[in-house]
Every structure is written in structure tokens, then in C-alpha cells.
């Protein structure tokens, strides 16, 4: 079955950086777009970034543009989220996600994604 496993979360000071990784197994990674979402306590799960299957197209939420970078390595079946200039409001659980079908192109809504990782906590605090 399809599995997504995130890693790389932790505690970081404002202005710091973290890189999240999401390893995918159980399917041909390069056939599907991938996304990162985050959910803060008491809030909805929101899209952070999305990357197309060949890495040629990306989408970023306005709140992270210029600070976060999504990338993928098809040889390693892994998608990354490089987070720079972190702010306290970036504190959340971060999830990677994949759609069910390769026909889904640059999905941005959570209901367009079918497979989810378990999440990794990112805390930005002095």
C-alpha cells in the first residue's frame, strides 16, 4: 500500500531554517504531483506548497512565498520542503500528501489528496 513518512521537524528559533522530507513507497513516485500541508492548533489544514510530478511547476501559499521551497528527488522517491526565515506563525504539524490519481494536476485543496503522512511537528519559538 501507499505510505508517506515525514521527517525533519523540530524546534527552531525565529529566523531559523528546517528541511522536511517525505519518503513515499508503494507507488511510482514520479507519476504523481505532491503537496505539503500544515495544521495549527484549532485551525484547518491548509496547503503550503505543491510540486508537479516532474518538478517543473510549483505552487506556494502566499504566507510562505519567498521563504519556503518545495522540491523532489524521483530517484529517492522523496519530496522536500526547505523552510527558511521561519516565523512563530509557521508553528504547526506539517503533512505531506499525494492524490489518488495521476490525473490530478497541481491539486491545492485537501480533498484532492488521498494519501497522507502521519505529520511532523514544527515549532518556531525563541
Image (cartoon, rainbow, N blue to C red):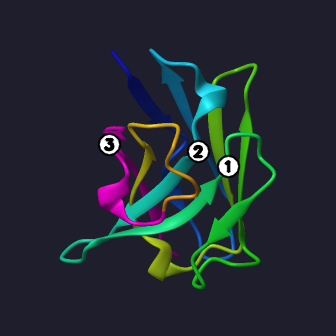
**Can the viewer see residue 11 in this picture?**
yes
**Residue shown at 50%/55% (left/top)?**
36
Q: Say what secondary structure mark 1 lies in.
A: loop
Q: Nearer the viewer, residue 70 or 106?
A: 106
Q: Residues within 10 Å of mark 3 (few under 14, many from 20)?
A: few
Q: Position of residue 89 (x, y in %)?
A: 46, 81
- Asked if the stretch drawn in magenta spans residue 121, the answer is yes
Q: Position of residue 84 (x, y in %)?
A: 72, 67
Q: Position of residue 62 (x, y in %)?
A: 60, 84
Q: Residues within 10 Å of mark 2 (few under 14, many from 20)?
A: many
The residue pinned by badge 3 equals 114
Name the outermost residue toward the left: 42
> Which image quadrant: the N terminus?
top left
- In the drawing, does residue 95 fall left or right of residue 21? left
Name the outermost residue toward the front: 103
What are the residue bounds of the magenta stretch?
108-126
- In the drawing, does residue 121 fall left or right of residue 29? left
**Can the viewer see residue 125 in this picture?**
no
Mark 1 and mark 3 lie on one chain; the one further toward the N terminus is: 1
The residue pinned by badge 2 equals 33
- Estimate the spatial distance between the alpha carbons at disc 3 and disc 2, rounded to whole Å: 12 Å
Q: Say what secondary structure mark 3 lies in.
A: loop
Labelled pair 2, 1 in contact (Cβ < 8 Å) = yes
**Residue shown at 57%/19% (left/top)?**
28
- Estimate the spatial distance between the alpha carbons at disc 2 and disc 1, rounded to whole Å: 4 Å
**Residue shown at 65%/67% (left/top)?**
59
- Asked if the stretch drawn in magenta spans residue 58, the answer is no
Q: Is residue 70 above or below residue 80?
A: below
Q: Is residue 39 above or below residue 54?
A: below
The residue pinned by badge 1 equals 52
Numbered label attached to residue 106: none
Mark 3 and mark 2 lie on one chain; the one further toward the N terminus is: 2
Amino acid at each position: 500500500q501507499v505510505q508517506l513518512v515525514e521527517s525533519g521537524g523540530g524546534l527552531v528559533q525565529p529566523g531559523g531554517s528546517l528541511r522536511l522530507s517525505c519518503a513515499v513507497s508503494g507507488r511510482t513516485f514520479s507519476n504523481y504531483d505532491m503537496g505539503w500541508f500544515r495544521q495549527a492548533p484549532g485551525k484547518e489544514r491548509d496547503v503550503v506548497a505543491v510540486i508537479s510530478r516532474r518538478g517543473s511547476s510549483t505552487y506556494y501559499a502566499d504566507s510562505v512565498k519567498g521563504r519556503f521551497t518545495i522540491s523532489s528527488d524521483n530517484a529517492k522517491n522523496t519530496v522536500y520542503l526547505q523552510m527558511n526565515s521561519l516565523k512563530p506563525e509557521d508553528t504547526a504539524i506539517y503533512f505531506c500528501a499525494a492524490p489518488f490519481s495521476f490525473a490530478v494536476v497541481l491539486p491545492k485543496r485537501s480533498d484532492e489528496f488521498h494519501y497522507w503522512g502521519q505529520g511532523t511537528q514544527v515549532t518556531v519559538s525563541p
